[in-house]
Each structure stands twice: as structure tokens, then as C-alpha cells.
Image: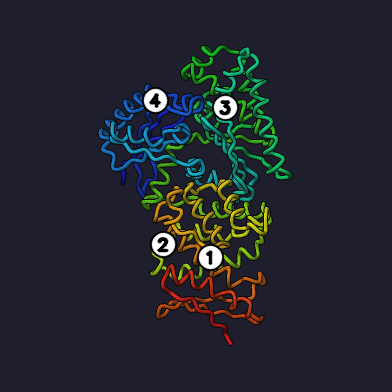
Amino acid sequence: MKTFAAIDVGSYELAMKIFEISSKNGIREIDHIRHRIDLGSDTFATGKISTERVDELCRVLREYGGIMRSYQVDDYKAYGTSAIRETENTMIVLDQIAQRTGITIEVLSNSEQRFLDYKSIASGGDAFNKIIEKGTAIVDIGGGSIQISLFDKDTLVTTQNMKLGVLRLQDQLGRLNIRPEQNESMLDEIVSSQIAVFKKLYLKDRVIENVIVVDDYISAVVGRNVAGLEHTSVEASAMDKFLERIRVKSVQDVARILGMPEENVPLLFISGVLLNRIAKVMDANLIWVPGVSLCDGIAYEYGEKNKLIRESHDFEQDIIACARNISKRYMGSRRRSETLEQIALTIYDSMKKVHGLSKRERLLLRIATLLHDCGKYISLVNLGECSYNIIMSTEIIGLSHVEREIVANVVKYNHMDFDYYEATGRDSSLDRKDYLTIAKLTAILKIANGLDRSHKQKFKNVKTTLKDEQLIITVDASLDITLEKGLFTKRAEFFEEVYSVRPVIRQKS
């Protein structure tokens, strides 16, 4: 059993949960500490977190450190989200915090943050798996933005981020200089335009029956009879009734009835209006509020990585499904992607002792094969650069920014000459290790691509054997493969440069 602390440095709250995690009992929360701190208003208004806020953050984190020691915590993870991610001086702030508190904060990319929130929901096990059997949208409402992820028949169809976070919207309303009674209509105007675009692009004829919401405000009042949201699952129409109940009361009365700080009431209302508008646009029947937070996702991931708990859901398949839908959006050839995937993974698995990469890099290669030709949607001439720009501009839930950049570069260099780190490293956020990963995966994808250069899937039953500094690629092909052999040489040269192994094609007689 491990005692673990999960710390969420959010836009408007600093939260810590203490868990006991064991293979026998799973994940059990034993304490939850929260401190209201408005980092987001600083970041979203000025681009920086003020000195006063940093001082307060460090003071509270030192207190959290004392609490962790009192629980004899074995390990911890502290993550910062949009308020820290969007500051102009992130590295300076993180260094100050580490020096003054001894707590190291890692910054999550948006896709990593939403994936952890998604894992926190999936930790519900059977309840989650049952609800996503029908058309479902996960609405993840944060301080800086919201994330909407669509599921259809257990499969993640798409995930999109919009700058409609509750703190950001509160800041926008504050700058309009309007009467309080106008807030809801203005909020509806701001929200409706972006939701309408989302509906046109991604909903189309898709039927969404359920909405799952993750937030810090609606989730906090669910289950209280006074809130009008008595159960974790309610009919979508209940949100209208809830908003009506709090709309006619003063901030002071709502705070007293719901037992929350007065400053949280406007954010609760914004979160409710957001959720209500989304549910109506989707014509959803049911809203499920599981009451989980980022801290639960952090604990789930820790237990998963340390083999203390079993996965309740195949998250890797969600990442792959997301990549497949991106490929489909840009008119990618599914048949050819599947051919490249099969060849590339066969080569990867046979080269384990040489490349020294892990299961995670295998997933990145797989995603690269699925997105290998997405740039043709824009240009057949600048295929590499266009593919790179599409991948870097498209969120792939579950991948960090660096991982997405690795995939984008592998796809780009599959179509272009490789740019060495010595020439480009100074202008990139990638380090030497990342560049070596790009080189290794690119070499494999180039070979796989070369074996299907005609796009006719000529090779059947591709097998590979590593022998005497050669990678013997045995193919069963009934069609003429003169083109593939003729264009294979240059790709083979780069592979040999990277691995000191020469790939050789052998055709079955």
C-alpha cells in the first residue's frame, strides 16, 4: 500500500487530496484540503502571476508539505494547469516555488490535463463504461477553457478545446461594464456562438444522450437537497430549474444555502449556464456529475503506472481513435494507414534490442502512421510541412505537447530530408533525447512507407528478422515490386545511419 498526495495548482483553487492506494482496496481518499487562490485572474488579465499571489501560493504549499509529512506520504505529484501554463514567466515562477517550498510543480499541457480528468471519470469503472455505450459528451469546465469530448459506441470520436473557462468569462463580463441582470444574456451570447460552431463541425447528425460534467462548482452542490440537483445523475431539464432557483436569490443567500464562499457563487452560475447551454445544443437527456477532480485523475495515473491498480478502461485505444478521426477529417486513406501501421510496428518490435525505446514510443509511431498523409488535404507539394502544421494545431488527447511535436516531426521527415539537431536544436523546444527518438521513429516510418510506395498494398505477410547487422524484410508479393525496390535505397541509407543496421528486402519465391 502507498500513501499518495495529489496537488492541483488550479486557476482559482489550490487543492490537495491524500489517498491510500493498494492492489487489494484500490484508491481510497483519506483527506481533501482546499485553498481559494485566484491565480487565473492575474494570468488571464496581465499575462503574469503577481508577486503577492506567488507569496500566498508558496505559503500554502509549505503548509501542504507539513500535512504530507503528518500523513507520512510515500510520494506526491503536483501539477499546474492553465493559470501557470499561460503565464509569460512560467519557469521563473516554478523555480521560486521549488526553492521556497521544496515542492516541484510540473505543468500539464491542456491535452494532458483533460486526459487526467477523463481518467478520473473512468475510474468509476462500470458506471462510466455503461454510460458511454450511448452517445456521450464529457464537458470539462476549467478556469481558462472548457474541453468537450464526444463518445459514440464506446469510442472517442473527437475532443475540442474552447476558451470559455469560468474565470476567463467572468473577466470578460467584468470588462463589459454592464448591469448584473444583463450578465446572463451577455454570457449566453458569448457562449452560444462558439457552441454553434462546434455543433456544425462535430455534432452534425450525431445523437448525444448523456453529458458528463467535470467542474469545481456544479460538482460541489450535487447531492444537496437545497440545490435542486439531488442525485449525481439528473435529467437535463433539472439544470434549468437549478439556475432559476439561484437566479432569483442574492449572492449572500445562495452562499448561505449552498454553504460556499460568496466569491464562488458567480462562478457557480457561469458554470451552470455553460453546462445548460451545451446540454440544450446537444439535445441531451441526462447529465451525470460524478463529483471527481483532477486530483482523482492524478492518483489513478500514479496507481496505474506503479501497477497498484488495474486499468478500468483502455485509454490507449482512445488516443488511437482520436488520431484515426483526425486522419478521417483530413481525408486520410484508412487502408494505407493500416498497411503502414502493420509494417512499421513489425519493424519496431523486431528492433527492440537496437532502438532501446519503450511502449510509449511505439504508440507515437502508431499515431504517426495514422497521420502520415494528413497534409495532402492542404498541399500535395508541401506534404511534410502541411502535415506538421496540422498535427501541431490539432489536440490529441492524452499526448503531451512534446509528444505531439515528436509525432509531427516524424510525419514531416517521412516526406522530407532529415534536419539534424546540430542545425535546428537551438530553435526548438525539443532536447537531444527527443531528437534521437524522432530520428529512430522516422527511420522506421520511412522504411514502412518505402515498402508501399505505389500505395497498392502489394506486400502480404511482412516478416522481419534481425541478423548479422542486417534487417531481413521478407515479403510475400504476387505483384511486381520493381518500384519499391528501386526507391528503397535512399530510405535504407537513413535507416542504416540511425541504427547501423542495413534493411534488405527478400521476396518469397
Q: CA distance from mark 2 to mark 4?
A: 41 Å
For the residue marked with disc 1, what is the amino acid?
Leu
Which residue bears the numbered disc 1? 445
Q: Which residue lies at the image location 46% right of the left edge and 62% below the top edge?
A: 439
Mark 1 or mark 3: name the one nearer the start of the chain: 3
For the residue marked with disc 4, what is the amino acid?
His
Q: CA distance from mark 2 to mark 3?
A: 43 Å
SS of the residue under disc 2: loop
User: Which sits in the foreground, 396 or 382?
Assistant: 382
Which residue bears the numbered disc 3? 271
Give the label, 2 or 3, closer to the camera.
2
Q: CA distance from mark 1 to mark 4?
A: 49 Å
User: Which sits in the foreground, 218 or 168?
Assistant: 168
Residue 351 location in percent, x, y?
Answer: 43, 70
Left or right, 261 with reference to 458:
left
Label 2, residues with CA under 10 Å away: few <14, some 14-19, many ≥20: some
Left or right, 286 with reference to 26:
right
Q: CA distance from mark 1 to mark 3?
A: 45 Å
For the residue marked with disc 2, what is the amino acid?
Leu
Q: Is residue 366 above or below residue 248?
A: below
